[in-house]
Image (spheres, rainbow, N blue to C red):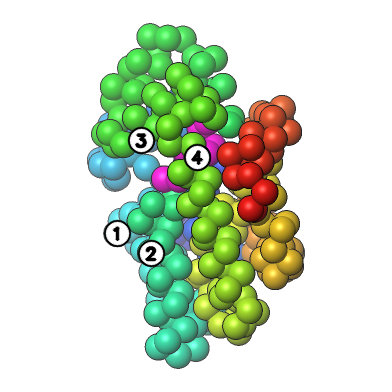
Amino acid sequence: MTELTLYHNDMSVCSAKVRMTLAEKALEWESVHLDLRAGDAQAPEYVALNPNQVVPTLLHGGRLVPESTVICEYLDDVRPDPPLRGADPHARAQMRLWTKRLDEGAHAAAGMLSLCVAFREQHLDRDPDALRRYLAAMVDAARRERIAQALEFAMDAPGFAPALARWQAIVADMDAALARGRWLAGEACTLADIAYAPYLARLEHLGLDDMVRARPRVAEWWLRLAARPAFQEGVTRWFNPAYLALFERQRERARAHARRVLGGDR
């Protein structure tokens, strides 16, 4: 049995970037899949591993490593070849600036977009009492507020437009970075590119990818990234058909709404 065990969720973007890193490293791992809508991340046995009630969590030889950004760098230490942090100190710094940006607001913004476009439908289908218990047990107050906004206002939620604008700015900065090299942190694919791969897939699924297609360098980078075998292994093969169907039902409405929000400058 492998020493690596990953507690994760199929459609979690944070889980996906860790799975892609595992695939790039050709590391074997044991899967413990959590149903987030069923409250598995709030179960006492999981909270004992991760008090923040989020996925993923890595267990390696009996030692816990939480937080997806930290897990990816940890895996690069566990198996340094192929290296995924850049060839020199500057490239490594650029890689960390990109992943830091995700952790400092871009991830939450993507969550807001996902909630307002699609995931609110899942929550609204729940028994009201079960939904109240689910929200009450959530330790992340900001996430609870995002869900509440999405449930009440859908894409008219106060947080939707700022979240969309944040990702528009990120894509513009990706375009500038890709003018200097083939990948976000230089000439080699790094953890920066891997970290953003599931988020670009999510924008595409939600119909919010006009901003990507409007920038040829970003669109070409995204195609190269999605064609990597590790993307197929760590991201695509875990796509949940029920979620994909939900995204498809909402996609054109979301695309039209995003165009109104952003206007002609995509």
Front: mark 2 or 1? 2
Circle 4 — which element? helix
Sequence-first tag of 1 and 4: 1
**Residue 7 placement (x, y as % from top left):** 43, 46
Quadrant in which residue 138 is drawn: top left
> Where does label 2 land, which residue?
100
**Disc 2 to disc 3, how far (Cα)?**
19 Å
Q: Nearer the viewer, residue 165 or 60?
A: 165
> Where does label 1 land, which residue?
63
Sequence-first tag of 2 and 3: 2
**Residue 240 placement (x, y as % from top left):** 65, 37
> Where does label 3 land, which residue?
143
Magenta segment range?
A: 108-116
Horizontal placement of 140 versus 154: left or right?
Answer: left
Sequence-first tag of 3 and 1: 1
Circle 1 — which element? strand
**Disc 2 to disc 4, how far (Cα)?**
22 Å
Q: Nearer the viewer, residue 249 or 69?
A: 249
> Where does label 4 land, which residue?
161
